Image (spheres, rainbow, N blue to C red):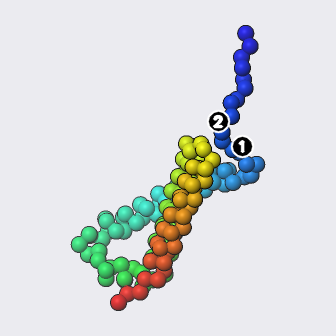
Amino acid sequence: MKINMEVRNSGREKPRDSRFELYAWLFMRFSGVLLIGLALGHLVIMHLINNVDIIDYDFVAARYATPFWRIYDLILLLLALLHGLNGMRTIVDDYVHPRLWRRVSLSLLYSFGFIFTVVGSYTILAFQPK
């Protein structure tokens, strides 16, 4: 009995001969570990150490008076955005098969990612207390 081992073409592009996917895979693992630590630190500081009643504009202004908290929040924002965008890119590559729809989906994804990165970074870095 002969088994047909031929793989049918699903209409997808052939994988690129680059190491991008390896680096994206590694980034997901490292950023996930960092995000767990940063997010848990954020939750402890904002919800366990400080009561919700004292977190207001003055509290945030006092935190952002030092560069450490701005950098902390910026790293948390950038890692979360990049981690999420990379995950969505993988989902689009896996489930959106027509080339045109994949390009449109990835273009929208990258555009929204860029907009959120710029707006979030600007908000953190340009914040000036009254």
**Residue 46 image-quadrant placement:** bottom left
User: Depth check: 94 or 37 in front?
Assistant: 94
Determine the residue positioned at 54% across, 47% down. 91
User: Depth check: 17 or 13 in front?
Assistant: 13
Amino acid type, label 1: Lys
Name above or below for residue 67 compared with residue 103: below
Determine the residue positioned at 53% across, 58% down. 109
Instruction: Determine crowd level at label 1: few under 14, some 14-19, many 20+ residues with C-alpha closer than 10 A.
Output: few
Marks 1, 2: nearer the viewer: 2
Please identify the quadrant where the C terminus is shown.
bottom left
Determine the residue positioned at 47% across, 57% down. 36
Q: Residue furthest bottom?
A: 130
Residue 60 is situated, as x and y percent measured from the top left of the image, at 36, 78
Name above or below for residue 55 compared with residue 4: below
Give the structural element (helix, strand or loop) at label 1: loop
Mark number, residue 95: none
Mark number, residue 14: 1
Relative placement, left or right, of 41 versus 17 is left
Q: Residue furthest top?
A: 1
Q: Is residue 30 visible?
A: no
Amino acid type, label 2: Ser
Q: Is residue 119 visible?
A: yes
- The residue wearing badge 2 is 10
